[in-house]
Each structure stands twice: as structure tokens, then as C-alpha cells.
Image (cartoon, grey):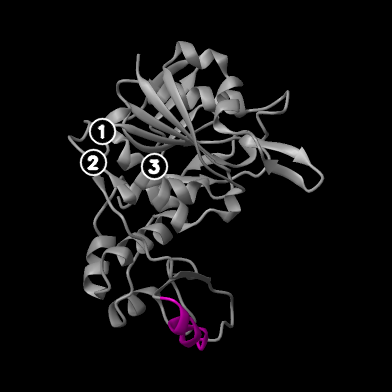
């Protein structure tokens, strides 16, 4: 029987109602007690990393998760991380860059309603994540949600209320889980050994352009950030310029079909490895976990 490490980080799945709204108060052991069926799937060790609303999760927490997994990587057959949904896609993308070529599954799941509620998606999602973690074919970083397995660099939260909250953007789902069975859509060979990274630079800003945007904003950004992600119009148009001209004249990096979550976290990862602009470009343009197709 596979031995899986369950890492709890807070989020709605672990929340209880309080006078101030839902608050992460359910720890990893209590989460596990809510799914007694899990004992038939795998052997589980549960640990609490932190207890946060996911809107408060950022690069320091992604690094902490990756460090913890690296420290005990040889002791377990897979890893399941429970997490809030609002920034789950950012965490999945970040871990895809911090833990590359993993022969073991590193899975992120959560829920739209607390496991404390009677009618909730939490139990199913947690059980599905454990099932996929225990499957012999599983490896790499992925999101498991509403019966779908989505590669970490392609996940995005597209619905705020529906249990069907996450979609795979411009790439097929890796698998589905139906009635307790893992049905793979895409199978790839397992890598031999993981590569862990230990640095990220959070000084990345996302600028979504609006008509009439004042170009002076870039002077302000340059004083406070090391990189800016510019969401232009259409196929990359900017005011008074077209995307091709910008790409050629000032050597902007084209992100193609990458998700914004993957773009931001990959830049943070690349800038964490080097400050040389050409090396940053080289790292960013190297495909990782199907982020660039």
C-alpha cells in the first residue's frame, strides 16, 4: 500500500464558520478523520504546514512547501496538499517550477465548501487526490478537483461558486476520476529523479492595459519591480505600437498560450536563479511541464 504525505495549508476545505466568516480552523488530522474511506486507498501521514486563507499565500509559502517535500521526498510515495481555491493555480504553477521532473505525484486539492459542511465537495476532492496519488502511473505536479486531474502549469480557477471550479487551459486534462477509478487520458514516462529549486524573486508586477494607459507607469514600475508582465490587447498590441514591433525592438518575452499564473511564477523562479536578462529569457523560454507548447 502506498504511503502518502498529506500537507494541510488552510483554505475553505479546512474552514469553520466564525463571527468573521469562514476561518481555517480544521487541522490535518481532523481533515483525515473526515474521510475514513481513505484508509482503504493508501497509508497516510498528515502534517500541518500552515493555516491560511489562500489569498495570503505567496512565494515564501511556495518555497516552504517545496523545501518540506524535498526534505522528506524519499520517505513517501506521493504528496497531497490541501489548499484554498483562490490562489491554488498559482501554487500549482509555482511548485511545477520549484519541483521539476518529479517521479512522484505532488497534488494540490481543495474545495468550494468546507469539509465541515454536510453538502460539500471537500470529501470527494480529497479522496480523489489520494486515489490519484496512490496510482502507479501518477507523477509530477497537478491539481485534482471535481474529478479532473490538471497539469500544474495549466490549471486556472474559472468559476467562483460551482464545484466544477477549475479548468485546464489550452491543454487536455491528464485524467479523470470516476466512481473511484482513475482513467488516464495522457500517460507519460516517469522521470528518473526530481530537480528542486530553492529561490524565487517575488518582484514581479502584472499590468493589464486599458485604453489610454499612460506609458509613464513603466517608469514607476521599474523603481519597484524587477519584471513586469504586460497584458496587451488582442494578439499583444500596445498603444501606438503593435505586438511584433514591441517584441523585436525592445526584446519583450512572448508568453504564447501560458496562463497568467504560470507566467508570473515562472518569472519569479527564473529571477530567483539569475539577474542576467539573457539568462532569465533563456530559462523562461525553456518549456517546463507543458507550460510552453
As rendered, which of 38 and 174 lies closer to the eye? 38
Residue 218 lies within the magenta run: yes
Residue located farthest toward the right when viewing the structure as drawn: 19
Q: Main secondary structure of the magenta part?
A: helix
Magenta part of the chain: 215-225
Circle 1 residues within 10 Å: few <14, some 14–19, many ≥20? some
Tell me what residue is drawn at x 45 percent, y 84 percent. Answer: 223
Query: Residue 288: image x %, image y %?
Result: 28, 49
- Residue at numbered disc 3: 171
Whichever of callouts 1 and 3 sits on the residue coming sooner in the sequence is: 1
Residue 103 in sight from this viewpoint: yes
Whichever of callouts 3 and 2 sits on the residue coming sooner in the sequence is: 3
What is the distance, in whole Å, between disc 2 and disc 1 at their CAs?
7 Å
- Residue at numbered disc 1: 103
Whether tag 3 and tag 2 are in contact, CB under 8 A, the answer is no
Quarter-wise, where is residue 259 in the image?
A: bottom left
Query: Residue 43: image x %, image y %?
Result: 41, 18
Whichever of callouts 2 and 1 sits on the residue coming sooner in the sequence is: 1
The mark lying in front, picked from 3 and 2, is: 2
Residue 270 lies within the magenta run: no
- As helix, strand or loop, the secondary structure at mark 2 comes to loop
Circle 2 residues within 10 Å: few <14, some 14–19, many ≥20? some
**In the rendering, which numbered label is found on residue 293?**
none
Relative placement, left or right, of 106 versus 278 is right
104 versus 274 height, above or below: above
What is the distance, in whole Å, between disc 1 and disc 3 at their CAs?
21 Å
Residue located farthest toward the top when viewing the structure as drawn: 40
250 versus 152 height, above or below: below
Query: Residue 264: image x %, image y %?
Result: 42, 61
Whether tag 2 and tag 1 are in contact, CB under 8 A, the answer is yes
Query: Residue 228: image x %, image y %?
Result: 43, 73
- Residue at numbered disc 2: 194
Amino acid at each position: 500500500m502506498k504511503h502518502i504525505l498529506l500537507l494541510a495549508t488552510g483554505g475553505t476545505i479546512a474552514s469553520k464558520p466564525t463571527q468573521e466568516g469562514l476561518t481555517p480552523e480544521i487541522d490535518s488530522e481532523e481533515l483525515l478523520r473526515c474521510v475514513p474511506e481513505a484508509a482503504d486507498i493508501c497509508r497516510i501521514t498528515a502534517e500541518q504546514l500552515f493555516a491560511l486563507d489562500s489569498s495570503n499565500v505567496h512565494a515564501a509559502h511556495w518555497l516552504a512547501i517545496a523545501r518540506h517535500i524535498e526534505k522528506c521526498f524519499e520517505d513517501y510515495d506521493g504528496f497531497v496538499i490541501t489548499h484554498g481555491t483562490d490562489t491554488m493555480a498559482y501554487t500549482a504553477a509555482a511548485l511545477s517550477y520549484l519541483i521539476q521532473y518529479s517521479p512522484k505525484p505532488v497534488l494540490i486539492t481543495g474545495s468550494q465548501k468546507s469539509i465541515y459542511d454536510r453538502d460539500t465537495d471537500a470529501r470527494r476532492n480529497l479522496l480523489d487526490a489520494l486515489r490519484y496519488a496512490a496510482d502507479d502511473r501518477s507523477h509530477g505536479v497537478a491539481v485534482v478537483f471535481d474529478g479532473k486531474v490538471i497539469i500544474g502549469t495549466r490549471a486556472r480557477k474559472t468559476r467562483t461558486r460551482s464545484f466544477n471550479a477549475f479548468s485546464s487551459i489550452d491543454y487536455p486534462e491528464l485524467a479523470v476520476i470516476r466512481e473511484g477509478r482513475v482513467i488516464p487520458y495522457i500517460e507519460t514516462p516517469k522521470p528518473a529523479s526530481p530537480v528542486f529549486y530553492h529561490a524565487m524573486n517575488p518582484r514581479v508586477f502584472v499590468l493589464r492595459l486599458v485604453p489610454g494607459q499612460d506609458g509613464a507607469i513603466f517608469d514607476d514600475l521599474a523603481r519597484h519591480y524587477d519584471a513586469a508582465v504586460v497584458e496587451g490587447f488582442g494578439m499583444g498590441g500596445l498603444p501606438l505600437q503593435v505586438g511584433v514591433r514591441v517584441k523585436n525592438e525592445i526584446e519583450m518575452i512572448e508568453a504564447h498560450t501560458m496562463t497568467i499564473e504560470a507566467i508570473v511564477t515562472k518569472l519569479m523562479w527564473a529571477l530567483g536563479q539569475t539577474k542576467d536578462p539573457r539568462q532569465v529569457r533563456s530559462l523562461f523560454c525553456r518549456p517546463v511541464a507543458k507550460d510552453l507548447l
